[in-house]
Image (cartoon, coloured by chain):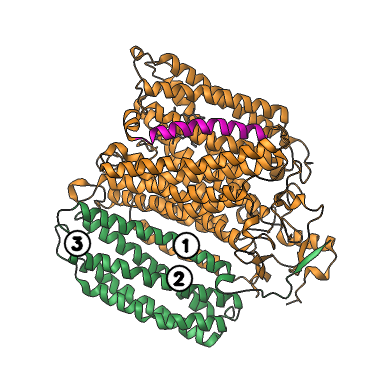
């Protein structure tokens, strides 16, 4: 064993070169599967989620094409059922939640000034599990086994009596994969933010985006198990004859709804809270002033996170619950609008007082505020039981949740893509195309979804594959379909913009927007080790304080190592090494995925699967003599 | 370059709140704990809907579950010593302590096999049977997983890789997780065996 080499023994340029060598990974096929670099994995996650957005979007376009004219027969009822189920499930489980959570996989370590996440191999594992789960769903769809009971898969429709074939099993197992990966990312995020913030980043200096990721991760930890429990029960009912949801044998169908929505309502906030983090991250550099009401915004995140657990029953108003229960859940559903209102107030105050720069990211923030407020208004409406009873299962609800989900999450995401693209890929996106992209999205989205409010009030139910001309819904449906295609065109424009940018030589500056947070300190894209020296911060916008960040020394230069700091004050406590690349997370994900897939067909798969799963986990954890394993 | 901190003198591994894996273990305990709470909630929910409880089945036989509870509680003193020995990095005590903990883990698993028939209801008899087996299965998975991990760790500590601060950290976290496995059994035990008798 050679003597350990500290960065204080070397000149800074030498440290940088050594660390680059230590943290970079072989550019081979093995290296591709074995990577544990949070930036590569974060990027893969986001790209994969965007591919699922494309697939889910294509399903939506087929639906809109079908509904554009009355008495249409482009697709039949069976395919249509699969389409809305695939669309909803893909959008929620494979696109929106993962993309928001895993933008953090890339950005959180950079924003808090560290070199990696707390558990890099778990991170890699979670990606592969997610990929296999999503792929399974879409492969099943193409071999005519796509689920068809809606994205919340209600029993008894999805149960053993009515849910024939393997469709609902595929859905339920897709849940197991994606929630497993979501939970792994959540634990990773929590520990990374708790223990790996650079010295000086006390809790009152954590970037708002990171706060949003942290609160979301906590919500995931407490809510996602609910859907894993319920989907496991569903599989058991279907596969081994349990009676959880079988009313005739002492089970209960509403048990499914309670468990699902105990997860499902918070899920909306897994999407929305990180989106608010994106909005906060963009507003500061584009208003060129510090955020007004930082503490209010943090408290609003906590309040939303907390209240979101008291709302699930508002999805069940028409199931005949006791009157008092309904009043309580109406009140809590309206109360959750309060923290959102406070957030919007702080953002507007910051913008009001700032010197605005009207670049594309900021435009999308304005689009977000506009659309989200519209969705919030209809939300307060459907929180009231009488109104909900009237519009339940109509297109009014479809309009409402697309305003919240697309307005509240996709618009911020698009802004975030324009904002962080240079950091991810070292190239700027084109501004002129960006502005076209924004306006096309804005017009297309509103044209697609505004008429649905009226259609809903006119009585058009959701989840119908066609309607007769006499209903008089044709005109507005056609408008909606045209809007949907315009909206899709705005994504095509984004794709062109991205492809053209990637063809140019990289050359984006480290901090193209003059932002103040740490992810803009290293080069674009950052080197494999992120920071040659761990920064020390003294404010919320450290890059605005001094031209050159003060730093920490004393880490090894010959192995992967990071500084561990205390929970509240971020005072250095120790140094922890971080594992080198390994193929085992990939192998483990593969073996576990095959086992879970097998269990759709026979419960014995779980028993036989134990052997290979055990072997791979031993392979994963058994020491291999790398420097990082020394203590 | 303005150097404001130097960490060269800080330790290179740590225990408890200093260690990442300790926090990671806590995170997994939180999410598994919420799984347990929700499953218990499902049990109580079905119970309030039923006319009588246990539903069309005799009362569960309390003995195997009680024996499991006693065995799990009996393992706690050694488990406590394990975290202490791990912190002291005392290799010999840790090795034999792990052997002991493996036995303390395997024994309740054997009794657990009998427990499944002692609940006097099958998973496919009715909703009551389903939820009883679900809770029991969930907890068994936890014992099983921890025992498997303990066995691997025991083997590891007997190799040349044992003398390493990082491994002692693993032993410490393993003991930490075992508390969770033991303590979650107590409310589930009460729920499965005593709540139906009180109802
Ligand atoms: C490309 C833009 C989109 C279009 C044109 C679109 C269109 C539609 C339509 C027409 C339906 C109703 C199907 C029916 O009830 O018959 C629907 C349902 C749904 N959409 Fe979208 N959507 C889009 C984007 C999104 C996004 C981004 C999300 C989530 C982040 C989303 C989530 C959902 C969900 C959860 C459902 C309910 C599915 C179900 O009933 O099971 N959609 N969408
Ligand atoms: Cu809700």
Can you identify the residue that label 2 sits on? Answer: B177
Q: Earlier in the sequence, mark 3 or mark 2?
A: 3
Of all chains in the rendering, the one displayed in green is B
Query: Looking at the rendered structure, which numbered label has been put on residue B28?
Result: 1
Mark-to-mark CA distance, 2 and 1:
9 Å
Is residue A167 visible in this depiction of the protein?
Answer: no
Residue located 80% across and 53% down the image: A546
Q: Specify the segment rendered in magenta.
A: A361-384
Q: Nearer the viewer, mark 3 or mark 2?
A: 2
Does A481 appear in magenta? no
Query: Looking at the rendered structure, which numbered label has been put on residue A334?
Result: none
Q: Residues within 10 Å of mark 2 (few under 14, many from 20)?
A: some
Rendered shade, chain A: orange
Provide the major secondary structure of the magenta segment.
Answer: helix
Q: Residues within 10 Å of mark 1 (few under 14, many from 20)?
A: some
Q: Nearer the viewer, mark 1 or mark 3?
A: 1
Q: Does residue A472 sit above or below A274 in this rendering?
A: above
- Residues at marks 3 and 2 touching, judged by CB atoms closer than 8 Å: no
Secondary structure of the residue carrying numbered label 2: helix
Does A378 appear in magenta? yes
Mark-to-mark CA distance, 3 and 2:
31 Å
Q: Chain of mark 1?
A: B
Mark-to-mark CA distance, 1 and 3:
31 Å
Image location of residue A62, percent across then percent down: 46, 25
Q: Quadrant of ligand 1?
A: top left
Can you identify the residue that label 3 sits on? Answer: B121
Image location of residue B36, percent across then percent down: 36, 60
- Residues at marks 2 and 1 touching, judged by CB atoms closer than 8 Å: yes
């Amino acid at each position: 064993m050679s003597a350990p080499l500290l960065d204080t023994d070397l000149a800074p340029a030498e440290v940088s070169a050594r660390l680059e060598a230590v943290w970079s990974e072989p550019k081979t096929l093995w290296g591709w599967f074995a990577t544990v670099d949070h930036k590569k994995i974060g990027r893969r996650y986001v790209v994969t989620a965007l591919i699922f957005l494309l697939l889910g979007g294509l399903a939506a376009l087929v639906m809109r094409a079908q509904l554009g004219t009355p008495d249409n027969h482009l697709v039949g009822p069976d395919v249509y059922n699969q389409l809305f189920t695939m669309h909803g499930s893909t959008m929620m489980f494979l696109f929106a939640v993962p993309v928001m959570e895993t933008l953090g996989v890339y950005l959180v370590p950079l924003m808090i000034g560290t070199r990696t996440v707390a558990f890099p191999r778990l991170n890699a594992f979670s990606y592969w599990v997610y990929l296999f789960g999503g792929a399974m769903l879409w492969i099943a769809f193409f071999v005519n086994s796509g689920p068809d009971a809606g994205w919340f898969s209600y029993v008894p429709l999805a149960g053993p009596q009515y849910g024939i074939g393997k469709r609902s099993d595929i859905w339920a197992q897709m849940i197991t994969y994606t929630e497993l990966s979501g939970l792994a990312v959540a634990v990773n995020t929590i520990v990374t933010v708790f223990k790996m913030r650079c010295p000086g980043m006390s809790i009152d200096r954590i970037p708002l985006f990171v706060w949003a990721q942290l609160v979301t991760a906590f919500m995931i930890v407490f809510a996602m198990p609910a859907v894993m429990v319920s989907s496991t029960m569903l599989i058991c009912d279907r596969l081994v004859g349990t009676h959880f949801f079988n009313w005739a044998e002492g089970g209960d169908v509403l048990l499914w709804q309670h468990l699902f929505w105990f997860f499902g309502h918070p899920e909306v906030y897994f999407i929305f809270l990180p989106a608010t983090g994106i909005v906060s991250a963009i507003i500061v550099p584009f208003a060129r002033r510090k955020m007004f009401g930082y503490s209010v915004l943090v408290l609003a995140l906590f309040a939303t996170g907390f209240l979101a657990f008291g709302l699930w029953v508002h999805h069940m108003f028409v199931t005949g619950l006791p009157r008092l229960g309904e009043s309580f859940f109406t009140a809590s559903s309206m109360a959750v609008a309060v923290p959102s209102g406070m957030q919007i107030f702080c953002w507007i105050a910051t913008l009001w007082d700032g010197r605005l720069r009207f670049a594309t990211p900021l435009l999308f923030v304005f689009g977000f505020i506009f659309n989200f407020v519209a969705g919030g208004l209809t939300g307060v409406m459907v929180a009231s039981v009488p109104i909900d009873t009237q519009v339940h299962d109509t297109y009014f609800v479809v309009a409402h949740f697309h305003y919240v989900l697309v307005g509240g999450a996709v618009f911020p995401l698009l802004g975030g893509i324009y904002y962080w693209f240079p950091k991810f890929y070292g190239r700027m996106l084109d501004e002129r195309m960006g502005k076209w992209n924004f306006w096309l999205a804005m017009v297309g989205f509103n044209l697609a979804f505004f008429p649905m409010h009226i259609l809903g009030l006119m009585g058009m139910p959701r989840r119908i594959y066609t309607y007769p001309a006499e209903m008089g819904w044709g005109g507005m449906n056609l408008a909606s379909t045209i809007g949907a295609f315009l909206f899709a065109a705005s994504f095509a424009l984004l794709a062109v913009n991205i492809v053209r940018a990637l063809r140019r030589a990289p050359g984006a500056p480290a901090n193209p927007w003059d932002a103040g947070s740490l992810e803009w300190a290293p080069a674009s894209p950052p080197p494999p080790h992120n920071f040659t020296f761990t920064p020390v911060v003294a404010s919320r916008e450290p890059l605005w304080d001094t031209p050159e960040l003060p730093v920490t020394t004393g880490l090894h230069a010959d192995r992967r190592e990071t500084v561990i700091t205390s929970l509240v004050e971020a005072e250095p406590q120790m140094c922890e090494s971080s594992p080198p690349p390994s193929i085992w997370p990939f192998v483990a994900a593969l073996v576990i995925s095959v086992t879970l897939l097998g269990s759709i067909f026979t419960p014995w798969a779980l028993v036989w699967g134990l052997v290979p799963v055990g072997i791979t986990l031993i392979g994963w954890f058994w020491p291999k003599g790398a420097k990082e394993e020394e203590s | 370059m303005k150097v404001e901190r130097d960490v060269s003198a800080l330790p290179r591994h740590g225990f408890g709140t200093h260690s990442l894996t300790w926090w990671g273990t806590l995170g997994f305990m939180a999410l598994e704990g919420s799984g347990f709470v929700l499953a218990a909630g499902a049990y109580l929910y079905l119970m309030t809907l039923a006319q009588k409880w246990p539903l069309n089945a005799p009362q569960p036989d309390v003995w195997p579950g009680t024996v499991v509870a006693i065995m799990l509680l009996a393992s706690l003193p050694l488990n406590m010593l394990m975290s202490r020995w791990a912190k002291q990095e005392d290799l010999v005590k840790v090795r034999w302590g792990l052997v002991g903990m493996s036995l303390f883990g395997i024994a309740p698993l054997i009794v657990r096999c009998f427990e499944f028939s002692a609940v006097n209801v099958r998973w496919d008899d009715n909703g009551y049977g389903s939820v009883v087996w679900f809770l029991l299965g969930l907890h068994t998975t936890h014992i099983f997983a921890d025992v498997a991990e303990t066995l691997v760790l025991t083997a590891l500590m007997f190799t040349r890789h044992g003398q390493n601060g990082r491994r002692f950290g693993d032993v410490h976290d393993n003991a930490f997780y075992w508390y969770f496995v033991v303590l979650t059994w107590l409310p589930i035990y009460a729920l499965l065996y005593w709540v139906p008798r009180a109802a």
